[in-house]
Amino acid sequence: MDTPSVDWFAISPSLALLAAAGVALLGAVLVPRVAVREFGAVVCALGFAGAGVAAGLLYWKSPEATLEVAEAVSRDRFGALAQMVVAGAGLLAVGISYGQRTRRDHVGEYFALLAAAGSGMAFFVQATNLMTLFLGLEWFSICLYILCAIEIDRVSSLEAGLKYLVVGSFGSAVLLFGSALVYGATGELEFGAIASAIAEQDLVNDGLVLAGLAMLLAGLSFKASAAPFHMWTPDVYEGAPTPVTAFMSAATKAAALVLALRVLVTAFPAEEELWTVAVAVIACVSLAWGNIAALVQRNLKRMLAYSSVSHAGFMLIAVAANNELGAKALLYYLVPYSAASLGAFGVVAARERELGQRVTLDNIGGMGWERPVLGVAMWVFMLAFAGLPLTGGFVGKFYVFAAAYDAGWWWLVVAGVIATAISLYYYLAVIRSMYMRMPAELQLAPAGGSPPREALLSTTVVACMAVTVGSFFAVEPLIDLAEKAAAQLPF
Amino acid sequence: MNEWLVTALIVFPVAAALVVWLFPWSGQAAGSLALLAALVEVGIWINALTRFDFGGGLDLEQQREWFGDLGVSYHVGLYGWSLWLVGMSVVVLAASIAYAYWTGRENPRAYFGLMLFLTGAIVGVFSSQDLLVFYVFFEAMLIPLYVLVGVWGGPGRLGATITFVIYTMAGSLLMLAAIVAYGVQRGSFDFAEGGTSDNHWIFLGFVIAFAVKAPLFPLHGWLPDAYRESPAEVSAVLSGVVSKAAGFGFLAIAVRLFPEPANDLQPLVLGLATAGLVYGSILAFRAPDVRGVIAYSSLAQMSLITIGIFSLDDLGSTGAVLHMVNHGLVSAALFLLAGAVERRTATGEFARLGGMARGRPALATVLMATGIIALAVPGSSAFAGEFLILAGIFGDGWGWAVAGAIAIVLAAMYMLRLISGVLHREVGAAVPDEALDLRPAELAVIVPLVACLLALSAWPAAITEHLSF
């Protein structure tokens, strides 16, 4: 069998991160213990920055979408833009991770795994056949399983790792089984070929294809933590180290949703009557479940976990729209959402390190006045989640609604609007706790001492805030990027 | 230059807010800086007034593309009538900031920054010419208000803010859905380019949002708590200025862009507004405290303004605009006076107030003057506004006009009750003998508002003759 020609440039973002993971792993052994944290963080950050630059070049140099490496990965702007989001999220996650009290003998591996997970995601979003899809999925999932459980001194971290492993593997298995069914029915692995096989062999109503499609969708929904496949999300988000949660909530979701759109649009255009409805239903369930469950949470990480479920719902509305506007909306939405999500978990991490205990709505009382920069940043993130103006979250929601309306899904717009109204209650509860309730009034024990000043964490949070607000004012350039990327999908 | 004037009106206070926030000013410095910025803002507005061309429609226009693929642009400009709303807003905001400066607030940098930010957002609402820009400013207005009430408000502030935000946002989100439905398919959100629509549902989406903001009966549930729990100057802004965003929305969006649905549903809106007018007036008459009277009178007056706008008649709209300016100044002055009274007696309840006129001539004079203008005594600007509104609505049926006239009688009753409850009767239990008359600083804040009202009473044509719709 011939060795396929490899377009190294097409997979350079993955390779950059893979190299960083390797170097970081070597550093864990070779670098003196005192410097291993710094070394790992710098290498990991360089890896993400390199991947971001490579993805940018890839975007620039790929005006036409092509299939590379034996038609296993695609070289296109859609994937490259998603890689830029993942790389940006990774870079910010490194900033949040640096001050985390990971054990010295694990910190090198921590950064190696973070880079490896990013590498897997970068590969995953480019996948154009069922094999690479599954490979990418497992690649980053396995890294994340370990990352969740890396704080082995904490039971809840171990619990999170185990839960994610069990439920995540179940999700992967469902996806793999679905892939097998689709392959069995069509005899093809590559997405485009699957689409033509379905059209040529008249498999539109074939049971195997339909079952496979449903299982693929379920598997991807697990990763995107869309309801009803989200059961693992609150527990894992709560138990995992906060920087890992931050990275997962932004990057994993981005990768899973982007790939879901790619698979559905390229491989199953013939079934669009069916999957748009399925996605719309999943979106509505996510919106309802995520928002209602978030209302009653006191633990901030759990609340943000349910909020991320509801945002998966919003982004799935864009997928269900099944038009170019929807793809644009999804790609745009990911930017402010990821920034706000990373930033919000960054603020949680700061408070967690300050108090040495779980962060709840009660013990952030008065935090806004004590730490004005983080307070204002949290304000901005909550406004972005709630879709209020002067943050990109508003424009994102607007695009999502516009796409849904354009596709004729007016009731999805209504569902989204109702969900937003409900979500305000718990997003504003965070602001209420931070600014309107004083620790004295809540009768909390004083935190004691001055909070640890972490310049890097604060800088990261400010950077997230800049992206969240900046994406509101700079809509045109971002949408332009998204437009060129969306144009390469076969709508 | 003219092109940038409106943008300057919006951006200048926001920039000043950032300056107040970002640098470590002392409380004094932050307050004086904010006051200075608010006064400069008034100056910018006067500059805009002198440059304004009242002959045509829209003037001082500026348009820049924001996101082109959906046809959204940053489009601002002023009509003759919205210019006056902006003027009223910047004056009231300056007075409120001055009042807060005099009273002193905790965390002054945060406080004054938010007030300035609010100024920018409000001017933005009154000058937007694109639905999405309008929505952005409409929501941006809510953000500082939420904190201003929630942090610096009275003991029941948390409940008050939640009710306020949930009511307002439920309305706003309906409006967002309406905006999407209006604009996505015609590819433009511009007031002028978008053209008119005959879709009743979209019209209702807008009307409900504005009805919450105004508020109109029966969507006024947030009003009493929000007006009672806010700091006095924030209540002044809420009832004087923020409620006028609804008036702007009715006039610039609901009536203009939806002529047909506005015509079809005119009886519905007029019916609710009339109900609110009578109901609000009765509640104001029954309210046990000063702020309650002003709050419910605000419900009544906004209903009257809505009646003027939905008379769908130029005379009624002219009256509505004049009355919006009037009511903004009147209710701001009244809330600030209520604040002054509460500072001296620690209560606003009529049962424990009274007899404050004796030995306090300045308080008595200013409160009397404001109250008498508020009850629309002939010759006052409020009388001119109400008269025009009633004249406008008379053409649609004399029944509406009669209801309006009854409400004006009720207004006299509740305002006189307010005046006598505070100033006359025997000295109330909560009024200490050493309670001072209005201080020069307080006079310097409130007298300009009253002076504006007197000037308008002398020359209402300043507004009515200088309107372009």
Image: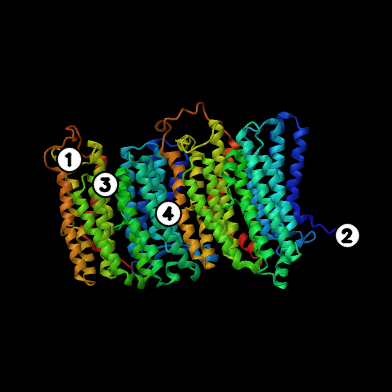
Quick check: do tags 3 and 4 share a chain? yes
**Proximity of marks 3 and 1: CB atoms separated by less than 8 Å:** no
Question: Could you tell me which secondary element the residue under label 4 belongs to?
Answer: helix
Which residue in the protein does label 3 denote?
Answer: B335
| Mark toward the start of the polypeptide (3 vs 1) | 3
Q: Chain of mark 1?
A: B
Question: Could you tell me which secondary element the residue under label 3 belongs to?
Answer: helix
Q: Amino acid at mark 4?
A: Glu
| Mark toward the start of the polypeptide (3 vs 4) | 4
Mark 4 to mark 2: distance in Å?
A: 63 Å
In this rendering, position of residue A356 left or right of residue B51: right
Quick check: do tags 1 and 2 share a chain? no
Q: Quadrant of the N terminus of chain B?
A: bottom left
Given residues B451 and B407, the one toward you in this image is B407
In this rendering, position of residue B45 left or right of residue B416: right
Which residue in the protein does label 2 denote?
Answer: A1
**Proximity of marks 3 and 4: CB atoms separated by less than 8 Å:** no
Q: Amino acid at mark 1?
A: Ala
Quick check: do tags 3 and 2 share a chain? no
Q: Is residue B371 above or below residue A404?
A: above
Which residue in the protein does label 1 denote?
Answer: B351
Q: Residue at x 46, y 28 (%)?
A: A445
Question: Could you tell me which secondary element the residue under label 1 belongs to?
Answer: helix
Q: Please name which of the two marks, 1 or 2, marks the residue nearer to the observer.
A: 2
Q: Quadrant of the C terminus of chain B?
A: bottom left
What is the crowding at mark 4: few (fewer than 14 residues within 10 Å), some, or many (at least 20)?
many
- Residue B248 on image: x %, y %: 35, 61
What is the crowding at mark 2: few (fewer than 14 residues within 10 Å), some, or many (at least 20)?
few
Is residue B134 in sight in this rendering? no
Is residue A448 in sight in this rendering? yes
